[in-house]
Amino acid sequence: MDDCIFCRIIDGRVPAEMVYQDDSIVAFRDARPASPIHVLIVPRKHIPTLNDIAEDDRILSEIGTVAKKIAGQLGVGESGYRFFINVNRGGGQVVFHLHAHVVAGNDLGTFFIKAAVCCAIIWRKLASLFGR
Ligand code: 5GP
Ligand code: ZN
């Protein structure tokens, strides 16, 4: 499809940093990575969303297998990564060509714990300053 950015990447009309390719799937680095590792796994076939996959289509399990492979290659298979698909606008989908995200390299769990501890410390300081 001419108006689909991922179809244009798959056709080679738009450049992207490829990390994996086979007959049915390509994977490339996200242009605006949310983490040091952020790869998009994309079927070559233009399927708009997860809702459009036929029941007997094996594409989801192929995407999962590729995710596992890429995570291993990028060295985060054991330490861990996030694997997710946004579906439609309410699910955060922006590009309407089915794709899965593989995100890793930030310690997402401890980031929120550290942020909460910092907020608690600042709160206590403010409370003591204002005599509460
Ligand atoms: P969605 O929100 O649809 O699940 O994710 C779409 C992703 O595609 C976003 O993370 C966005 O940064 C990425 N993206 C959009 N346009 C391009 C592009 O032209 N090249 C690459 N490599 N990634 C893109
Ligand atoms: Zn497309």
Image (tube, rainbow, N blue to C red):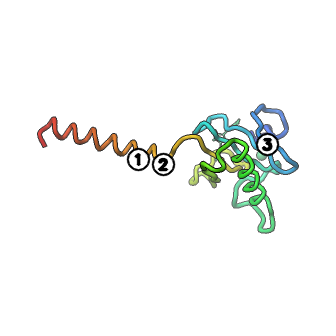
Q: Is residue 125 above or below residue 112?
A: above
**Which of these two is toward me, 119 or 53?**
119
Residue 114 image-quadrant placement: top left
Residue at the outermost front position: 78
- Residue topped by disc 1: 113
Question: Tag on residue 109?
Answer: 2
* Residue at (52% x, 43% y) in the render: 107
> CB at mark 3 closer than 8 A to ligand 1?
no
Q: Distance between the residues labelled 2 and 1?
A: 7 Å
Q: How far apart are marks 2 and 3 (CA)?
A: 28 Å
Q: Is residue 122 left or right of residue 25?
A: left
* Residue at (75% x, 48% y) in the render: 42
Q: How far apart are marks 3 and 1 (CA)?
A: 34 Å
Do the numbered discs 2 and 1 sit on residues whose CB atoms are within 8 Å?
yes
Amino acid type at image mark 3: Tyr
Q: Is residue 113 left or right of residue 31?
A: left
Image spot of residue 110 (x, y percent): 46, 46
**In what element is the residue under mark 3?**
strand
Residue at the outermost left position: 131
Residue at the outermost right position: 23
Image spot of residue 122 (x, y percent): 27, 38
**On-image quarter of the C terminus:** top left
Graded by Cα atoms within 10 Å as few (under 14), some (14 to 19) or many (20 or more), the crowding at tag 3 reads: some
- Residue topped by disc 3: 20
Residue 126 image-quadrant placement: top left
Amino acid type at image mark 1: Ile
* Residue at (77% x, 68% y) in the render: 55
